[in-house]
Image (cartoon, helix red, strand yellow):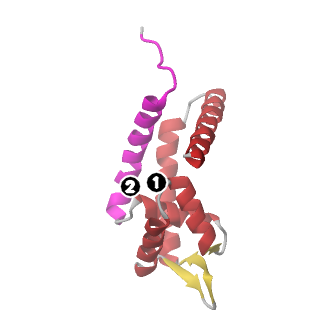
Amino acid sequence: MSTAPTLNGQVIGQAHYATRALLESVLAPTGTTFNQSVALNAVAGGGAAVEHGALVARMTGTLKIDESAVLATIGELAESQLLQTLPGDTSRLRLTEAGRALNGRIRAAVAEITERLYGGLPAEDLQTAGRLLTLVTARANAALADA
């Protein structure tokens, strides 16, 4: 009988890449990149519209990418008519009808993946894992801030 591995970067990385591969299999047929899917989801979660600067800050902070990559992503989504600025307020962004529809399809597929991966796992284990990963993330962010 094998023992469960201790939580470490390798275990976290393997889980990340396995789940990311599943997400990429959902995104590929839509022509959507990972960064675009994150932006669509962030704007959808922001209600009617989000501040341009807040979206940039969220994506640079969460994905650890530079501002130019985020601006390129926003530009791609606008060019594809999935995202637009509010009429009369270019500092705010919202999804177009096509953007909402695409985001809805992606979210539904992600919900199915989430159920396949996490469904049936004990709630206590999920809470413990969530707590530990949140702590590791906070420590990594602090180390990045000090670098």
Q: Please tell me whether residue 11 belongs to the stretch shown in magenta.
A: yes
Image-quadrant location for residue 146: top right
Image-quadrant location for residue 17: top left
Q: Residue at x 46, y 79 (%)?
A: 78
Where does residue 47 sit, x and y in percent of width and height? 67, 70
Q: Nearer the viewer, residue 82 or 68?
A: 68
Decide which of tag 2 and tag 1 comes sooner along the chain. 2
Where does residue 137 sit, x and y in percent of width and height? 58, 41
User: Of the residues shown, which amino acid type is indicated by label 2?
Assistant: Val
Segment tinted magenta in the rendering: 2-30
Q: Residue at x 66, y 27 (%)?
A: 124
Label pair 2/1, CB-CB below 8 angstroms: yes
Q: Which residue is mark 1?
A: 109
Left or right: 82 in relation to 89: left
Q: Please tell me whether residue 44 belongs to the stretch shown in magenta.
A: no
Q: Nearer the viewer, residue 111 or 65?
A: 65
| Residue 99 in view | yes
